[in-house]
Amino acid sequence: MLLRESGKRANQALNLPVVTGAQGLLGLDHEAELMAVAEAVYEGDPTALSTMRQATVVALGSQGLVDAISVAAAFNGITKIANATGLPLDATTVTKTGELRKETGIDSYSENHKASLFDE
């Protein structure tokens, strides 16, 4: 939701389905490096992390690397905590993010959706 709102404020037309695997470019500056940060943090592979760090420092500088990794790590942790507790979206968030969730297909990542795949 924040990415969508930030894009609106900056008058950027972002291709949001890319965040859940659709083909194309999202439309952000340094997009390739930021996606590499997210993927490397998620995968945790030491070689990929080292390669990502080197490329990101060149593109974004040392502070940009720290900021990008911090955001990726925080979102990874926040999502795991919310999923582990079974924390549902509140009614306001459900309403405000409905279009975004449909556009990106992000609901298919929810724990409820994953569990429903095993229901008979």
Image (cartoon, rainbow, N blue to C red):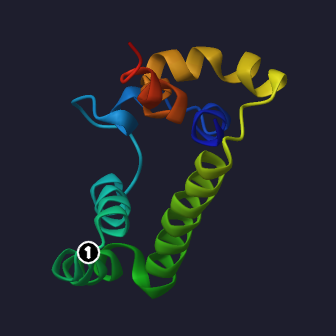
- Left or right of 20 on screen, residue 86: right
**Foreground: 102 or 2?**
102
**Foreground: 63 or 88?**
88
Q: Quadrant of residue 109?
A: top left
Which residue is rendered at x = 54% and y = 28% of the image? 112
- Left or right of 35 on screen, residue 96: right
**Foreground: 55 or 47?**
47
Q: Position of residue 93 (x, y in %)?
A: 76, 27
Mark 1 belongs to which amino acid?
Met
- Left or right of 83 on screen, residue 59: left
Q: Position of residue 47 (x, y in %)?
A: 16, 81
Which residue is rendered at x = 41% and y = 46% of the image? 28
Which residue is rendered at x = 59% and y = 33% of the image? 4
Which residue is rendered at x = 61% and y = 39% of the image? 10
- Left or right of 40 on screen, residue 14: right
**Foreground: 39 or 4?**
39
Q: Secondary structure at mark 1?
A: helix
Quadrant where the C terminus is found in the figure: top left
Q: Which residue is mark 1?
A: 52
Quadrant where the N terminus is found in the figure: top right
